[in-house]
Amino acid sequence: MSATVRPLHPAAVTLPPACDLPPLPRFAQWVEDEMRHRPAHADPAKRDKLAAGTDSRWWEIPAGWPASSGLVKLDVGGTSRAEDTWPTLPHGARQELAWTLSTVCAGGGVVSRMVFNGTVAAVSWAHRQYGLASLVDLTPQQWAHAIVHRREHEGWTNPGRRRSGTAEKSSLNQIVQFLARLQRMVWLHYATEHWWQAEIWDADMDPRIPRRPHEPWMSKVNMLRIKQPWLREATRLWLADGITRDLIRISTAVGRHNSICKLVVFLTERGIDVDLLTADRASLNGIARDFAVFCRDPVGRGVRRARIVGAPGANAVLNDVAQLFEFAADNAAELRRFTGVDAWGRVGAEHTSAFRRMCARRGEVARKRAQITSGEKAYRDAEIATILSRATVLALPECETFTYTHRGQHFTVAGLGQEQAYRMLLLQIKTGRRMSELALMDFDPLLPLLTPVPGPDDADTGGRPVGGVAWLRYQQTKIDGSADRIVVDQECVDLVHAQQDWVRRFLTEQGSPVRQPRYLFVAPRQNRHGNRPYRPGHYYEALGQFVDAARIHDERDQPLPLTRTHQFRHTVATNFANAGVPVYVLQRFLGHTTPTMSMHYVAIRDETAEQAFLSLVKIGADGQEVPMDRTTMYDLLQLDRGTDRVLPNGLCLLPPARQCDKGNACYTCGMFATDRSFTEVHQETLERTRTLIAHRQRQHEQRTGRPMAESNVWLRERLQEITALERIIERLGQLPEDQHSLQGGGVSARVAPAAPVPIEITRKPRP
């Protein structure tokens, strides 16, 4: 007989008030809000099969679970008294528990005996007291009430089993959190709605959500954080449209959702509701201006550690909000039908421009860029040396000690036992990979290098290769289509092999039958099979402990912020550039699509830039060497302080105090200088100028019926430019071969002249 099909909605159970009930854990509160807000309906076929006990194929319950399957003894940690209670559970709840628990264990999770016993006891108590038959018959809050009352009854009947208040609250939170997770799994399998109609988008639990094979950790969205229904449903449609059309990833959707949540807090504080959609231009500009200030305010961010948000962070929030209104303007009719709010039909381009206009101006972004070029975003050589000399503290077991010297004093500290963090730190220092690229690497990321890259001869290497010996394949999760592998040396290969050995030992200690896990760096908890990657929180926590224990300080004796791991990427890029690596090689190594992005990571040292300038002969517009000492020219142009005298085709020798009145006629100007690095630019300009002259001559003849005379004022200037270009190109081609052009951003490998080139000055440069 078919079971009664009813909505998946919390039962109307009246529970007695519970005293001293702690707040729900975060995920349990999310499930509580979802179950209260939007009741889902079960698939009748699935509910019927479950009630009849014929759904073994769908549920995939191991035979004889839990007693004879070994899952309880292996994963829970010993025999459990809950096995005696198991047969008394209602059939539906028993089937749900069996499938969800076995699914958790099969995925590598570990269920503690306390949580397992408490979960089974809570379900049995709810069945006896309230006649409930399913895990989703109560919300997490109601389950917490039921567990507390069961414990009060148990403590009253058996005083010897009472525990301290702290232990009671801790175990209660663990059981409620675990029950919420099981409820969420059952809810997803029962529900017939689309994945984007749910209030919680969890890519780890819901396989229907599109995701990449290696998705970063940000994979949960709670739509109920957006309190305004008109804004929540619009955000739902906007993000779901982007994910389903493969325009964005779930991790990108998480970031955009967080930006809208900041807008929610702002609108709530200001008392602004749906009237935002119908505001006039002046009101919109005022709201957008106030929101821009709010985004920079640490209090407005709603985070624990208050600090001023930089221009890039605030710009990202403002751009996300602008994109939402841009989507609304392009899909006004559909959004109006979806949300039931007619005001969405009045959203136009003024909403988008109001928020996008509030992004930080170029001056502020330029100051951010100045921090990079000045080296503030890269670690100094002395700081890297300190990190490497004391990195052993990370890997040593907690029972061993390490002694180091800091500012003349000797310190002895215990090891931190963080071997994974130790190897990841060394790989970041050596390769400059992003933290996510290393954490999501496959277990076997090394590929053979058919032609090893030779390295410098070193008698101290003991015959070990010092050049590139293998490809290291990483997960390129940020830029689609970019390179996903780099050449690494033997030290990196040894680090990978050592990490592989550690993971194998870890799996053996966990009792896992898996010998080839998915990831090289694995989560240390709830990960028996190694199918979950190492998380940023574990890494940052280990680095914070390392900075405190090993006293990793800067030159001012202040702790280094090692948790800003992207600075290692800036450091590697800067070192490569200053070592003379061409920019196209640097672009390939960093995995960028354009050289411009690669140069954003580079901090060229002043001495390197000066050496590059002095090593190239400067040619004037007349095709002769500029009669000025190169050091004097470098000081005159103030290239160590700015680049406003750097032209697309050379250099302007006009003093900074004077203004240019020649427009773009640089090739006929006596203050123009260039070198061989601009040869291709000159050749291209020469061809374009000749083509332009031919085109203008044809137009002139068609318009006037006469050919353009050489005395034409426009043609005379262009012919002078061609003459100057021909002289410059001819003279640059006569320079010695060692005076080659600058390649890439770094040039410390270029050899400067031993002394300034003697030049006889026949005339004084123009003032």
Image: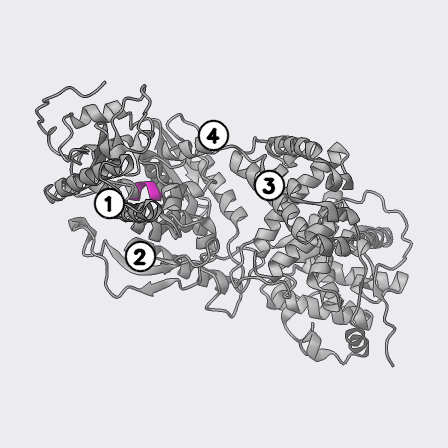
**Highlighted magenta segment, given as a residue range:** 572-576
- Circle number at residue 363: 4
Q: CA distance from mark 3 to mark 4?
A: 19 Å
Asked which quadrant contains residue 374, the reply is: top left
The residue lying toward the viewer, choosing from 329 and 207, is 329
Q: Amino acid at mark 4?
A: Gly
On the image, numbered disc 1 is attached to which residue?
686
Q: Amino acid at mark 2?
A: Val
- Is 211 in the magenta? no
Identify the image quadrant of the N terminus: bottom right
Work out whether mark 2 precedes mark 3 in sequence or the reverse, and give the earlier one. Answer: 3
The residue lying toward the viewer, choosing from 730 and 596, is 730
Q: Choose mark 4 or mark 1, whichever is in front.
A: 1
Secondary element at tag 3: helix
Q: Are marks 1 and 2 in contact (CB under 8 Å)?
A: no
- Give coordinates of residue 58: x percent, y percent: 70, 76
Name which residue lies at 76% across and 43% down. 165
Q: Residue furthest front?
A: 705
Secondary element at tag 2: strand
- Give coordinates of residue 223: x percent, y percent: 71, 51
Q: Amino acid at mark 1?
A: Leu
Work out whether mark 1 precedes mark 2 in sequence or the reverse, and give the earlier one. Answer: 2
Work out whether mark 3 precedes mark 4 in sequence or the reverse, and give the earlier one. Answer: 3
Q: CA distance from mark 4 to mark 2?
A: 38 Å
Q: Choose mark 3 or mark 1, whichever is in front.
A: 1
